[in-house]
Image (cartoon, rainbow, N blue to C red):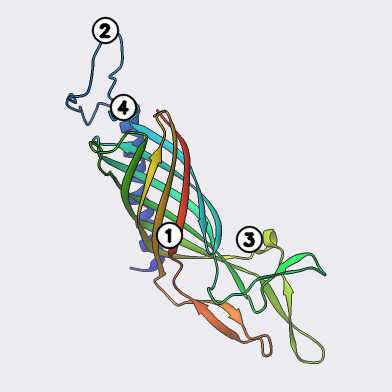
Amino acid sequence: MSARATFLALCLVSLTVFSTLITCAQDPRRYWAPSESKDTVFQAGQLPQDPTSPDKYPNIWSLDILLSNDGFGLGTIFRRTLTPDLSWFVSFSISESKDEREVEYYDYYYGTMVAPGKLNRFLVLPLMTGIQYRLFREDIVDTFRPFLNAGVGPAMVYVMPYVQLLQATEGYMYPDQVDYFKAIGKGQPHYTVGGFVGFGANFGTDRSNIFGVNFRYYFTTLLGEALPSLYDERTGAVAATKKNFGGFVISLNVGTAF
């Protein structure tokens, strides 16, 4: 099966999971009726008082701000509570990636950031589905809720030109930097499969508003050939390629529960 066919098949699986989660969200007790907690107090006309109970806010939609050595990114997650400790989620994000050998500096003369020898820009767009498991629910106060999580799914690496190498009349090659938004239209997608493992925590006593942090390590390696990333400034030949687009990411989560 080709990389493109694999990508499309995994997209279909992830979207099926997503639709299932949305269907479940419309009726929080349709697939799981939690047993009464020993700490739950029922009073006439009132909701359960157990702050760890998932039946009050079983669904979470959050915005992710991604920080890594490669730059910034944005993402979104829909998470559905299955049990007091276990959740199921679907996430999508878009973030920058660059060659670890790349060196960037600020050009004060032109007022721009410059990366000598950089040939291409990369954007990584993973669509993940996975599980999240809460740790130490009965041993730690509810204002600090640590968890482990892991996900897997299709990913797209979008490669865009950073410079175009032009030939001068004297015969040598020189770079012409491509504007970022113009480069998007000149890019090409490459498909693969990725995953991540991570740990983090949610904070606060208000369960309807979500704030947390997640430390993840992504595994995203191209199935085909590596992509050109750097060039030799003397000859214009490709000097380095990039095949692995994973790495360590810090994710800040802000969202709402319903």
SS type, badge 4 = loop
Label disc, if present, on residue 176 of the rendered structure: none
Q: Nearer the viewer, residue 13 or 195?
A: 195
Q: Earlier in the sequence, mark 3 or mark 1?
A: 1
The numbered mark, 2 or 4, whose residue comes first in the sequence reads 2
Tags 2 and 3 in contact by the CB under 8 Å rule?
Answer: no
Give the alpha-carbon distance from disc 4 to disc 1, as whole Å.
36 Å
User: Horizontal and vertical percent for residue 163?
Assistant: 68, 73
Residue that appears at 42% across and 43% down: 77
Secondary structure at badge 2 equals loop
Q: Mark 4 points at which residue?
A: 51
The mark found on residue 184 in the picture is 3
Locate the N terminus by quadrant: bottom left
Q: Which residue is drawn at 31% across and 27% down?
A: 51
Name the secondary structure under disc 3: helix
Instruction: State the image coordinates of residue 24 (x, y, percent, origin top left).
Output: 30, 32
* Contact, mark 2 vs mark 4 (Cβ under 8 Å): no
Q: Are the residues at dot 2 and dot 1 in contact (C-beta closer than 8 Å)?
A: no
User: Disc 4 to disc 3, how far (Cα)?
Assistant: 46 Å
**102 horizontally vs 84: left or right:** right
Q: Quadrant of the C terminus?
A: top left
Which amino acid type corresponds to the residue marked 2 in the rendered image?
Answer: Ala
Q: What amino acid is at disc 1?
A: Ala
> Counting residues from the N terminus, which is met first, the one under dot 4 or under dot 3?
4
Mark found first going from the N terminus, 2 or 3: 2
Q: Kindly identify which residue carries mark 2.
A: 44
Q: Which of marks 4 and 1 is nearer the N terminus?
A: 4
On the rendered structure, is 99 left or right of 126?
right
**In the figure, 6 relative to 90: above or below?**
below
For badge 3, the amino acid type reads Ile
Q: Residue 67's spot in the image, x, y percent?
A: 52, 55
